[in-house]
Amino acid sequence: MLAVAIVVFREVLEAALIVGIVTAASRGVPGRGKFIAGGVVAGILGACLVAAFAETIAEAASGVGQELLNAAIMFLAVVMLGWHNVWMGKHGREMASEAASLGAAVTSGARPLTALALVVGVAALREGSELVLFLYSIAAAGGGGPLNMLGGGAIGLAAGASFGVALYLGLLRIPTRHLFAVTSWLILLLAAGLASQGAAFLVQADLLPPLGSSIWDSSRFLSEASIPGKVLHVLVGYVARPDGIQIIFWLATLAIIGLLMRLVGGGPLPLDRGTRRAISVALLVLLALGIGVVAARADYLVRSPIVDYLEVELEHNGAYSHDRDPAKNHAQSYTNAIGYGLTPWWLTEIEGEWGADPGRNLAYGATTWENRFQLTEQGKYWIDLGAFAEYSHSPSRIGPDSVEFGPLAQIEQGELLHTLNLFAARDLGHGSAGVWSLLYAAQTRWRLNHYFEPGVEAYGTIGDVTVPGEIHNQDHRAGPVVVGYSYLFGTTKLRYEAGYLFGLTTPTPTGTVRWRLELETHF
């Protein structure tokens, strides 16, 4: 009911804003009421046709794959929600003044009365059509029964219409920008939730790999059957046992729409510091639910020697391989970490690891304590240096623990940034092979702008440094990568990395897709 009320309120509010301002601005024009009412009725009838068409599609598709229909409707709703937020970010401040100008033009006779009918009709049709898709997607996602949908719709309709009446009565001094800012964030989170649930339908239809089933299980803390769980499921797509692909779609939708809002409209409308802090905490908690704690870990990450003091980092890394050989196909690994810059030179993290070898189920792998140390002041010398050290603890009594450590180096060369990691690693304790391994990770990227930095990277492992063997029998892979970040609000940043690694030697898969998402904020 809450999600329905929010969506209906937002859509009715936008239509009411147009209708209310045009009506007030054209006060005194003979016959303006009939034209405005006619435009509203025409828009509503058009929206009803869209609703009837959507129902026809649903009935036709029910025999060939309801999951596909649900996913298509959800993703279409996500696109429209994203477009809605991006458009409002750019034009929201201009909307009221443009509507008032139209009313004044009609009053003076410069524009015909049909212009009033057209603008309010388009507003009603647009918002009504969006409501059809949004409410259908909410219903398909389990947003409630008919009574909840009806009750939420009534609440949203009454609230939105009341605001329109208030506008008409002359209460235009109310700072509507604050209202649009809050609802923009609600719509953004709702879109991310719908995208996540759309991905789940595609997994059910065997069109997407799950990338790990039940990455975590938070039902003991918050059940989807509980009232808070149902509310979060509808509002932000909360799932107690999500697949990996659902997490990726949720984060990617949040990042893409947020980035477009930033690029096109200058970002979401400003919130006060307290609200930004509350949103930061909420996002951190949401992502922290994913901190599980891989035998095959997502080590495809180039680490910087630079430490950000007092910065909280929530990080997700993933990798998924493909190859014609079943023994190398569909290997997957994921890590989730929370870190904090304790000092200007020391950042520490707790990391959870999950992974699966080809043909195996995803399983809990290890808990890792990771540390990065900045050894030189950034930019003082021709090279920035740091150090890395971690200890991984296996949950299995027969599995070994491990240590990994080594130097970090970074060189700035104009717009190019070169980074190199060299690590020594060894298993410890029961089940240990007792050998030292050497790992490297290197990346060069062109800092075109902070939204988009293309580059190349390479990773490799020498399994036993005492008997390294021939290169073609070692693990080496390389490929293109794209890196970037955007400010969501205040000092909170969302970083992303996406790369494709080609297998260069016999033991490596043909290709490996790897990604990274990191939310950063200062406290």
Image (cartoon, rainbow, N blue to C red):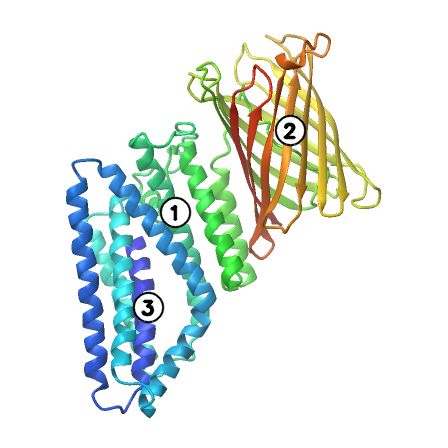
Task: Give amino acid for label 3.
Answer: Leu
Please say whether residue 275 is visible from this viewpoint.
Answer: no
Residue drawn 31% across and 46% down?
74
Q: Secondary structure at mark 3?
A: helix
- Which residue, given by chain and number where applicable, does mark 2 sit on? 458
Please say whether residue 470 is visible from this viewpoint.
Answer: yes
Q: Earlier in the sequence, mark 1 or mark 3?
A: 3
Image: 369 above or below 33: above
- Which residue, given by chain and number where applicable, does mark 3 sit on? 13
Question: Alpha-carbon neighbours of circle 2 within 10 Å: few (<14), some, or many (≥20)?
Answer: many
Instruction: Give the x, y percent position of residue 32.
Output: 23, 85
Task: Give amino acid for label 1.
Answer: Val
| CA gap, disc 2 and disc 3 | 52 Å
Residue drawn 36% across and 87% down?
104
- Which residue, given by chain and number where applicable, does mark 1 sit on? 236
Task: Give amino acid for label 2.
Answer: Ala
Q: Earlier in the sequence, mark 2 or mark 3?
A: 3
158, 27: nearer the viewer: 27
Image: 363 above or below 264: above
Residue drawn 45% across and 17% down?
358
